[in-house]
Amino acid sequence: MQPGSSASPLLLPPSTAFSPLHSPLRSRSHCNCSSPRLRRSIAKHRREVARAVTVAFAWPQMSEHFYTVASDSETTGEDKPQQSFPDVAIGIDIGTSKCSVAVWNGNQVELLKNTRNQKGMRSYVMFKDDTLSAGVTGAAARENGHEERDILSGSAIFNMKRLIGRMDTDEVVQASKSLPFLVQTLGIGVRPFIAALVNNMWRSTTPEEVLAIFLLELKALVEMHLKHPVRNAVLTIPVSFSRFQQTRIERACAMAGLHVLRLMPEPTAVALLYAQQQQQFMHDNMGSGIEKIALIFNMGAGYCDAAVAATAGGVSQIRALSGCTVGGEDILQNIMRHALPSFDSLYAGQTMDRIKSIGLLRIATQDAIHKLANQDTVEINVDLGNGHKVSKILDHSEFEQVNQAIFEKCENIINQCLIDAKLVPEDINDVILVGGCSKIPRIRSLVLGLCKKEISYKNIDALEAAVSGAALEGAIASGVTDSSGSLDLLTIQATPMNLGIRAGGDSFAAIIPRNTTVPARRDMLFTTTHDNQSEALIAVYEGEGERAEDNHLLGYFKITGIPAAPKETVEISVCMDIDASNVLRVFAGVVKPQGPAVPPFIEVRMPTLDDGHGWCGQALAKMYGKTLDLAVLPKKLQP
Amino acid sequence: MASFAATAAAAAAALLPGRCAGAPGARRGGRCAASAVALPPAPAARAQTHYEVLGVGAGASTGEIRAAYRRLAREVHPDAAAGSGNEGFIRLHAAYAALADPDERARYDRAVAVRRAAEAPPVASVGFRTRRWETDQCW
């Protein structure tokens, strides 16, 4: 195969207008992506589903009314949405390591199992000659027991959740270079190049494409179970996902023919489940509407989140959220590096030798970490070939020492959460530990210690909580009601990161601070920094950094036609609005002076960037930072 | 919270029609009328105190304020009440945020007292409603 003939790794033609609601999905086709590979895969799955599902059904037409048609799209005929199928949104938890899917079955949430009877399905996509197969069915693995080895052969892409929507300057992407597949970075703030090994050649792909293929297989599984097509889904995401990353998840879903009804931060999905249980408990015990405070700590393979939720009477109010990008993957890599410090010098470049050794070491280390949860010491013994052998005995203190930095980050996010919620540990009624890493003894003791609790909340399954919460939200958001009142729930969400604009050089002026309850609208006044400044650049960022450059750039636009005036006399209002669907809009315009000479306000839906251009922010700062800058107008005293 | 003031109202008022037109079709009905839902009819939103928004007396305990907030949230939150806009909930939450925190509440009470003293004569007529809440109290 010639390199030029391979399918384009970019799923988006440059002309495609992108925003979550400006979905490229058209009613007549499930996918208009440019990748023939994905189209083939979709066609294959359609055939499979058609075979598997015995009840005859017409393939669902994507109902137009769910989508605002992209302005550049050709109009299609009005297709009536098919109301004959119960249209309950499914809940999906895409984990870095494992995925699960659940649905409200009319009485309760039901987790679906794949053909191998698994509820948690390994998240990966295997690339072979002309076929792609995801971990949902696990068909790619030659034998059950060797699935992990096959995944690590270089032919499978996994950890998509860590790569999606990240730039090549991101440390998470840098750390992903020690995975068996190819992750190439240029370090300039563009998307990384990733590729899977097919017949001894690297074949390029993208995290969105990989995720879409996975979701497609997952969707087929659900449709097989439910015997009717599904189109709506609620997905859980890490708290630390930027709005740009969220658009990438929505993009992958759209490619798989799923409409995202809601993206829920993982701990808030758990909070919803907790609220339901508490409400049930109150009903049974005739309790009064006493408010219960839960701290939810969720740590999976890729991310770590914490949330404080106040629950009473079925209303769950998210008081604070915080998250970071550490997880089991980092623990695994730390231990691997600890077991064989000379790894990187032994194998230069992504050679077959290196891939094989990484695979062997990974499996051995992972196994050891799992065992260490239940025993005092564990032995890592593995022959990497070519005379390289690893033989190491690992105990708890060593394990904790090697991962000290990770545990500190976990502590930080919990403390941050408590401070933001204005609570002390004594206020907490329940500590809920979820996610794969919540099984690690040190993590449990750390979280419980910080919350001054002896035991964690018992009635929630650590691995099924997030997906169950997502399915609950899916049922509620689809308008399902339940006679027993178990769906009579409301989650009042909060926005996890500061949202603001660049102002006063490289500073970041936060307009909507983190943990603001949504829907929300806030505004801030800015002023010009030069005499007769006629234009100003509004660069919108999201994040916790004090400098704009430390945060994620979401988009930018100019205010033009500012009336000529001395500097610091013009008042420019920048208003940010997040609606209940979590859509961010920015409004900006001149509010002083007023009159017919002032241009109309501008409304921009964010994010507008269609790729994570890290260098874009730098270019903007360099080109326009001085001339089109704004300064924060000191707040006047309110009456 | 404090910054959400004059300019926001002016800007938002000017912008609202456009926003609603662009609002996702999923919001059934896509009603633009801000949120008269469940809130007592008031000639202008501004005339309502935070206590009035929450429907509690000036002496309400934090627990009562939280309970009122949750009860009203189920009526005005866009997720709970299909078709209602964001305005109602934003106003409800602003009232809750100002009153649930003791320091904020003290500051707000002082500010209201000062404002009332400044515009004493008109308050006599408007004050009727405010005072009604106080007399409703069973202290």
Image (spheres, coloured by chain):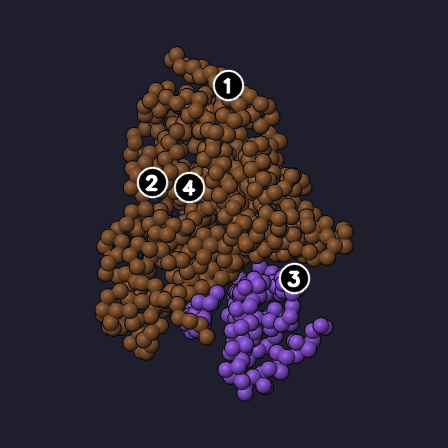
Chain colours: A brown, B purple
Q: Mark 2 to mark 4: distance in Å? A: 13 Å
Q: Amino acid at mark 3?
A: Gly
Of labels 2 and 4, earlier in sequence is 4
Q: Amino acid at mark 2?
A: Thr
| Contact, mark 2 vs mark 4 (Cβ under 8 Å) | no
Q: Which of A152/B106 is in front? A: B106
Q: Quadrant of residue B75?
A: bottom right
The subunit carrying tag 4 is A
The residue where tag 3 is placed is B63
Q: Which of A9/B117 is in front? A: B117
Q: Provide the secondary structure element on which disc 2 rests.
A: loop
The subunit carrying tag 1 is A
Q: In this rendering, which labeled residue sits more in front, label 2 or label 4? A: 2
Labelled disc at residue A164:
4
Q: Provide the secondary structure element on which disc 3 rests.
A: helix
The x, y position of residue B77, in whole percent, is 58, 62
Q: Mark 4 to mark 3: distance in Å? A: 43 Å
| Contact, mark 1 vs mark 4 (Cβ under 8 Å) | no
Q: Residue at x 60, y 29 (%)?
A: A116
Q: Quadrant of residue A603?
A: bottom left
Reply above or below: B82 against A610. below
The subunit carrying tag 2 is A
Q: Residues within 10 Å of mark 3 (few under 14, many from 20)?
A: few
Q: Mark 1 to mark 4: distance in Å? A: 35 Å
The residue where tag 2 is placed is A169
Labelled disc at residue B125:
none
The x, y position of residue A316, in whole percent, is 61, 54
Residue A494 visible in this rendered orientation of the protein: yes
Q: Residue furthest bottom?
A: B121
Residue A76 visible in this rendered orientation of the protein: no
Q: Amino acid at mark 1?
A: Ile
